[in-house]
């Protein structure tokens, strides 16, 4: 594909402060040049002038066209790569790309953790989102998506019987339902909170002998409602499930007002 060239980076000189005490205008602070490189190429991608899959000009070409040093261009490209807006495919060439949903969710989860959001704050959000997603999924779910949920249920039963960690399986179950809505924004909206909230299973399940069985029961009823395309029942069982999750958290002696933390990465685990 042909290269598409972003427009040149423009800079605005900061005016000198007036020495007239009657004026109160602050000096304009220009953004760093590498940030302007990032924003210029980002805008080309977001506006579609650089389509997904298009190859970017080389670093040298970009530096010449944008009127900046190669080191400045390199730093701007590094930010774009970290953001998922460009990726390397062959050699050192960069191509326009879309960030993966899971990468966006992970970054958003980190931001939530840094804000020290509590279990209850996350739970309130998912209590609003998850039943609505289940209702929408009941109207749009495809046979292969029902099969994926049933496969998840089989693996969840095994994990409960073996007292294995359920976090990845539970995250997968709810993500599959969000995917079944056919609306990509559901997963982007709910997953950052879910990635922080559902790992609470690891604190709760060892302390409550009935928690695993109750989780399986809720998942079973939700799947049946989805198979029957009963949006009301799917939403009702999901609401019970999310409410039961908080109830179990409190019964396990956990404080819902305490901040939640990002779970540590694990080796292996269930399929995503």
Image: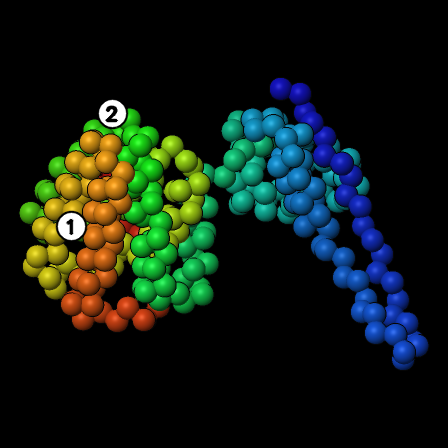
Residue 266 in the image, given as x and y percentages of width and height:
27, 50
Pointer 1 and pointer 2: residues touching (CB < 8 Å)? no
Residue drawn 40% across the image and 62% down it:
113
Residue 192 in the image, given as x and y percentages of width and height:
39, 51
Q: Which mark is residue 143?
A: 2
Task: Tell me if I can see residue 167 in this picture.
Answer: no
In the picture as drawn, the residue positioned furthest to the bottom comes out as 21
Q: CA distance from mark 1 to mark 2?
A: 23 Å
Residue 118 in the image, given as x and y percentages of width and height:
35, 66
Task: Tell me if I can see residue 246 in this picture.
Answer: yes
In this view, the residue in front, 129 or 162, is 129
Count residues near mark 2 (Cα–Cα under 10 Å), then give few for <14, some for 14-19, many for 20+: few
Q: In the rendered view of the protein, which quadrant contains the C terminus? A: top left
Answer left or right for 43 relative to 14: left
| Element marked by disc 2 | helix
Q: Reply above or below: 65 against 90.
A: below
Answer left or right for 49 relative to 15: left
In this view, the residue in front, 21 or 97, is 21
Residue 101's image quarter? top left
Answer left or right for 237 relative to 80: left
How did the renderer colour the structure?
rainbow
Q: In the rendered view of the protein, which quadrant contains the N terminus? A: top right
Tally of numbered tags = 2
In the picture as drawn, the residue positioned furthest to the top comes out as 1
Residue 15's image quarter? bottom right
Count residues near mark 1 (Cα–Cα under 10 Å), then give few for <14, some for 14-19, many for 20+: many
In this view, the residue in front, 238 or 167, is 238
Q: Reply above or below: 134 against 110.
A: above
Residue wearing tag 1: 215
Residue drawn 71% across the image and 54% down it:
32
């Amino acid at each position: 594909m042909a290269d598409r060239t972003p427009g040149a980076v423009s800079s605005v000189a900061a005016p000198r402060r007036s020495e007239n005490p009657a004026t109160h205008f602050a000096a304009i602070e220009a953004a760093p040049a590498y940030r302007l490189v990032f924003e210029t190429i980002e805008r080309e991608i977001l506006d579609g002038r650089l389509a997904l899959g298009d190859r970017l000009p080389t670093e040298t070409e970009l530096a010449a066209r944008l009127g900046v040093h190669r080191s400045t261009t390199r730093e701007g490209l590094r930010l774009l790569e970290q953001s998922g807006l460009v990726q390397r495919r062959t050699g050192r060439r960069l191509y326009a790309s879309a960030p993966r949903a899971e990468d966006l969710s992970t970054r958003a989860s980190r931001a939530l953790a840094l804000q020290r959001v509590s279990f209850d704050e996350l739970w309130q959000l998912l209590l609003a989102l998850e039943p609505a997603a289940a209702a929408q999924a009941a109207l749009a779910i495809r046979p292969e998506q029902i099969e994926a949920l049933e496969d998840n249920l089989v693996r969840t039963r095994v994990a409960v019987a073996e007292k294995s960690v359920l976090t990845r399986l539970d995250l997968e179950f709810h993500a599959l339902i969000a995917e079944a809505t056919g609306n990509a924004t559901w997963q982007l909206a709910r997953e950052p909170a879910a990635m922080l909230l559902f790992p609470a299973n690891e604190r709760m399940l060892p302390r409550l002998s009935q928690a695993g069985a109750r989780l399986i029961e809720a998942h079973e009823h939700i799947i049946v409602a989805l198979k029957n395309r009963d949006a009301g029942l799917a939403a009702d069982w999901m609401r019970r499930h999310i409410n039961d999750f908080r109830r179990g958290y409190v019964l396990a002696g956990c404080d819902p007002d305490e901040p939640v933390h990002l779970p540590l990465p694990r080796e292996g685990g269930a399929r995503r």
